[in-house]
Image (cartoon, rainbow, N blue to C red):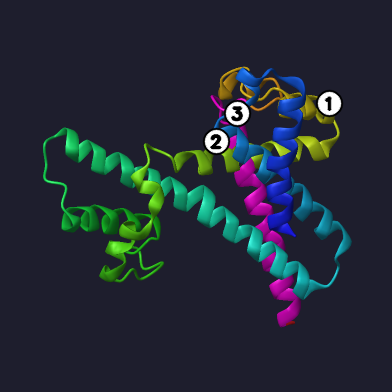
Amino acid sequence: MSTLAHELGHTMHTYFANKNQPYITSDYPIFLAEVASTVNEALLIDYVLKNIKDPQQRLSILGNFLENYRTTLFRQTQFAEFELKINEAGEKGEALTGDKFSEIYLDILKRYYGHDQGVTVIDSLYGIEWAYIPHFYYNFYVFQYSTSFMAAQALSEKLLSGKDDMVKKYLAFLSSGGSDYAIPTLKKVGIDMTSDEPFNIAINKMNKIMDEMEKILKQIKN
């Protein structure tokens, strides 16, 4: 169901953009595309949680949502840092060997997962993980997953608040296609990606998810 909601977000975006824009401005960038699809997922999860009371089911849904934060907001940022580091190495004229890539990747992986602090033990074998991730063969692609996920969480929270004619603004966002750059397009719907607000809203939402999971686990234990 979550996958269906995600893809229907793309469908809605394309439908409204094609309906309201001329051909030349109907297409939209990847960054905005992932906002539309992820907003749909967030709205679905909110609806499901409002209608499910069983603690085990809620724990499963919340845990899955928290995993989305890990794999999208944090892991894609980790991937983007790896892309930046290998490109910086290339600009310095350093040899870009597989061993060098693995060394850079493993160092970043350990930092992100708290290896030196004893939070998670990262085996050196994971240094080769970069080799099977196809997005690294594009030009700085992965950061858009992280930033669009953050924008989508902030946007979904504003939609659910019911304030400031958000539904009307959101439909205008879907209808805008590629008629403007991504940052000003999002500003029109109340999401300013040049400010801290989207990040703070997304992280606050993540903290609430963890708080409820801890509460449910405590109840189950008792």
Residue 211 percent across, percent down from the top left: 68, 60
**Mark 1 — residue?**
168
Q: Secondary structure at mark 1?
A: helix
> Which mark identifies residue 100?
none
For the N terminus, the quadrant is bottom right
Q: Residue furthest right?
A: 51
Residue in the picture at 76% in, 35% down? 158
Image spot of residue 156 (x, y percent): 73, 40
Mark 2 lies on residue: 30
The answer to whether residue 201 is magenta is yes
Q: Of label 1 and label 2, which has the lower sequence position?
A: 2
Residue at image location 69% in from the left, 17% down from the top:
22
Total marks placed:
3
Amino acid at the residue labelled 2: Ile
Q: Position of residue 112 (x, y in %)?
A: 39, 55
**Front-lying residue, 118 or 31:** 31
Res 28 label = 3
Q: Which residues are magenta?
A: 192-221
Q: Is residue 201 visible?
A: no
Image height of 188 relative to 40, above or below? above
**Badge 2 density bin: few <14, some 14–19, many ≥20, Cα 10 Å:** few
Q: CA distance from mark 1 to mark 3?
A: 19 Å
**Contact, mark 3 vs mark 2 (Cβ under 8 Å):** no
Task: Identify the amino acid type marked 3.
Answer: Tyr
Mark 2 residue element: helix
On screen, residue 37 above or below 4: above
| Label 3: element kind | loop
Figure quadrant of residue 218: bottom right
